[in-house]
Amino acid sequence: MIASLNGKIIYKDENCAVIECGGVGLKCFITRDTYSKLGNVGDNAFVHTCMTVKEDALDLYGFSRRGELEVFKLITSVSGVGAKIGLAVLSAFDYEKVLLFLASGDAKSLTAAQGVGIKLAQRMVLELKDKVGAAAVGDVLETVNQVGNANANTSAKEAIEALVSLGYSQSEASLAVGKLDGALNTDDLIRGALKILARGI
């Protein structure tokens, strides 16, 4: 099992990169986030990898952050979700957002990823919602816990409901409110969350 690559980039595009390790160029498929974080051709690069083995192919998937790799594994553990869908989801959203979508049951937002219909998104939420809390991917767990704490607070609940009524998704609203002081009243939480959302989470 190839767990990581560390070497010189000899080719790179938005879909894949070829990294030379010990004189051998290894191709790995990548997300948009990893593409943006890799250096230029000729630079040294390190990526975490996941390898899949099929009858007619052996493919590597590379990720610049460990958390992205763990969420890729989580997504592709769902029946009917292959590596292509996993990459599409993580190219559409940062992995922290994917965890928040799953934790809050926000299947609709996941459908923005190429190839993800509402039924597939709902299956992902159904199978993974209870697992997300155990994922413990870096400090994302802390963010998810903050959302959970926010949901347990009446003012925060009201603020999230108000933001959803304004057109924001459940996960966007939860994430924004979760970044604020839970002791604030509903109106202040809404105002603070709107400022966060206006800047982009």
Image (tube, rainbow, N blue to C red):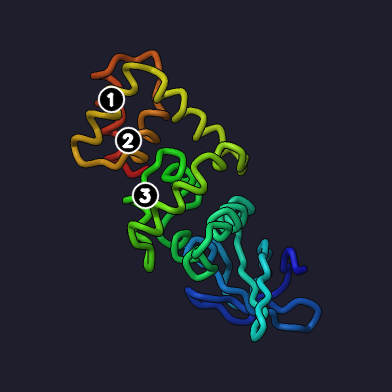
Give the residue drawn at x 71%, y 79%.
Answer: 20
The image quadrant where one finds the C terminus is top left
Q: Which residue lies under the disc numbered 1?
A: 159
Q: Mark 1: which amino acid? A: Ala
Q: Is residue 95 visible?
A: yes
Distance from disc 3 to disc 1, alpha carbons, whole Å, reads 21 Å
Between residues 44 and 126, which one lies in front from this camera angle? Answer: 126
Residue 13 x/y as whole percent: 50, 77
Q: Are marks 1 and 2 in contact (CB under 8 Å)?
A: yes
Q: Mark 3: which amino acid? A: Ala
Badge nearest the viewer, 3 or 1:
3
Q: Residues within 10 Å of mark 3 (few under 14, many from 20)?
A: many
Q: Residue furthest left?
A: 166
Task: Identify the element where label 1 is drawn.
Answer: helix
For marks 3 and 2, the one nearer the N-term is: 3
Give the residue drawn at x 53%, y 61%.
Answer: 79
Q: Which residue lies under the disc numbered 2?
A: 173
Q: Which residue lies under the disc numbered 3?
A: 107
Residue 63 x/y as whole percent: 60, 62
Task: Identify the element where label 3 is drawn.
Answer: helix
Between residues 148 and 33, which one lies in front from this camera angle? Answer: 148
